[in-house]
Image: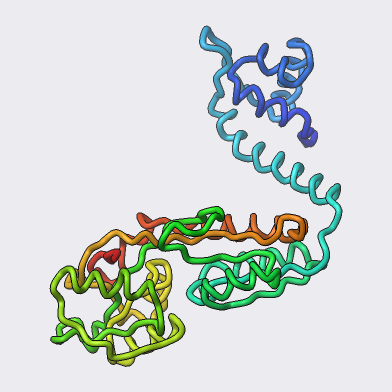
Amino acid sequence: MHDPIESDLLRTFLVISETSNFSVAAQRIGRTQSAVSAQIKRLEETIGETLFDRNARGAVLTRAGNQLLPYAQRVIELLNEAAATIRTKPLDGPVRIGIPEEYSQTILPAALAAFAVRHPAVEVTVSCDYTARNLAALEKDELDLAVVFDWSNQTTGEILCIDPTVWVTSLVHRLHEATPLPIAVYRNSTWCRDFALRSLEQTGLRYRIAFVADTSSGLKNAVLAGLAVSTLSQQYSAWMQGADERRRLSSRRFLPRRASPQSLSFERGNPGACREGARSLSAYVGSAAAVIRPRSLRRVPDGLSEKLAL
């Protein structure tokens, strides 16, 4: 039976694999080169394989070294995470965050749930509302954080991702073939006026407003029911197409192509009032939003045509 592998030996192994040099690794670790060489020798004896080939270029991983590398990285990452978790004072207290309705069913709930599991003492309150209302609540100190849409570069927060808007139609009802084009729009929305409607007007498409809603769910239902075509965020429309019962939806090339300036941004409240829990939660949400990439959404289920940004 082999002896267990010591974590200190794995740490030294990782530094050498990164620097490809025993001498440089020794300086970084704060040990002599002979001590580092002795550590690697012990590790090789424990494993029963040679881990490095030394040549004129330095220390190069062998086949066994390359096999060990990902496991060593995972072990050390887990040890560092465990140490940081144990040493860190548990977070507690209330954190109030506002999120857009379109993202309340996709990526953000998973991030919020993961945060709640990791920090059970933090009382997270979520406000699902329009960007304008969440920004107003932030100004009144009714929220600590807000994830908002920004289509005019007016917000000063951290940009989480660019999520273009797409025209969506039903392949069952095929209203995109109608003239004038029946469309569903947000009520009292400057965005609809400045971008969605203008994109139709600039391409000479005749349209009529057939459905008015306050939420993206209302727009989605209008499309599913065959009442209109509408505009939704690319990430939200991709999520809808990924659900089996919603494969009727697609974006089509009959509608105009136009770059959308819409981005998803993080706005923070009064820095003095932003508790440690709020800062930690912002990291979770930021990581979740980082998965949204336009390139990753190019392949549409069932061979449907590529989605087009406004």
Residue 146 in the figure: left or right of residue 303: right
Image coords of residue 119 (percent x, y): 77, 63
Lateral position of residue 238 relative to residue 39, left or right: left
Residue 285, by quadrant, is bottom right
Which residue: 65% across, 75% down?
126
Q: Quadrant of residue 299?
A: bottom left
- The residue at 42%/57% (across/down) is 162
Residue 29 x, y percent position in the rendering: 75, 21
Q: Is residue 192 above or below residue 145?
A: below
Whether residue 246 is visible to the viewer of this picture, yes or no, is yes
Note whether 172 is above or below 27 in the view shown.
below
Is residue 2 visible to the viewer in this orientation of the structure?
A: no
**Which residue is found at the position 45% from the left and 85% from the top?**
214
The answer to whether 276 is drawn above or below residue 123 in the figure is above
Colouring convention used in this rendered image of the protein: rainbow
Left or right of 146: which side holds 235? left
Q: Position of residue 309 (x, y in %)?
A: 29, 64
Q: Horizontally, is 160 left or right of 15 in the view?
A: left
Q: Residue furthest top?
A: 56
Count of numbered circles in the view: 0
Q: Which is more toward the observer, 12 or 250?
A: 250
Q: Name the image quarter holding the N terminus.
A: top right
Q: Nearer the viewer, residue 293 or 130?
A: 130
Q: Nearer the viewer, residue 125 or 73?
A: 125
Q: Residue 272: image x %, image y %?
A: 76, 56
Q: Quadrant of the C terminus?
A: bottom left
> Which one is in front, 127 or 10?
127
